Image (cartoon, rainbow, N blue to C red):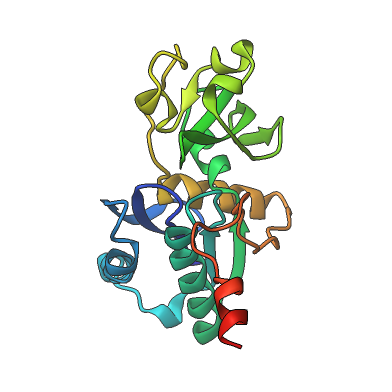
Amino acid sequence: MLLLALDTSTSAITVALHDGARVLAEATTLDARAHGERLAPGIREVLEAAGATPGDLTHVVCGLGPGPFTGLRVGIVTARVLALVTGAALHGVCSLDALAAAGPEGEVLVATDARRKEVYWARYAVSPGSVRALSAPAVTKPAELAPQVRALPTVGRGPVLYPGLFPAPVDVLDVSAAALADLAVARLAAGEELADREPLYLRRPDAAPNVVAKSALG
């Protein structure tokens, strides 16, 4: 196995290479506006660090979000193209799962920046080798989360952005492709299907066609 994992759902443009036993290399850049510019160099970096080529890949795993439309789309399109040209198997994993996997054991809240004064969030039960979602990914204003949910150990940038609302922050802010790769390898080894490849946008993009103007021009 040679598995490439990548995620562009958060401020991190992150890529990792995994051989089925361990992470061979990881490259991460923090820049919420440079997903398109930094993802390809990150892929090259991890392949060169491992002495591998794209043709050596057997699996490509992409974080599916939720996340902002443009950044998330960069990662998903790149993963699809890589799998197509190399023949590697294509897999998708919810990015919040990977964040939870990097957090503490027990019940955990993941809350990431959804902009518009909202967070993407989900609750998880984390144990050694297992990350189980207790709720589906959703988007909401942080103050609208139940107090007992906000009181959970919280992974992601939610506590940084809204420090008065999340009293138990965990020092894991963005997705790590290494955590994503470890999680994907464990799930594949357990015989799980990672066939879901549709992005988790959870809401419509900010930019949309001006249908009225188009119709008026006739």
How many marks do you count on the picture? 0
Residue nearer the viewer, 29 or 45: 29
Residue that appears at 65% across and 55% down: 188
Assign the C terminus to one quadrant of the image.
bottom right
Q: Nearer the viewer, residue 45 or 123?
A: 123
| Above or below, comparing residue 65 to residue 213 in the picture | above
Residue at image coords 27%, 52%: 31
- Decide if residue 48 is on the left or right side of residue 170: left
Residue 142 percent location from the top left of the image: 53, 25
**Residue 18 found in image quarter:** bottom left
- In the rendered image, residue 110, in percent from the top left (x then y), is placed at 53, 31
Q: Nearer the viewer, residue 156 or 116?
A: 116
* Percent of width and height locating residue 82: 48, 78
- Asked if 55 appears above or below 126 in the picture, the reply is below
In the image, is 9 to the left or to the right of 36? Answer: right
| Residue 133, x across and y down, in percent | 68, 35
Which residue, as the protein is rendered here, is positioned at the far front? 216
154 relative position to 198: left or right: left
Asked where in the image residue 204 lies, by quadrant, the reply is: bottom right
Can residue 65 be seen here? The reply is: yes
Q: Quadrant of residue 191?
A: bottom right
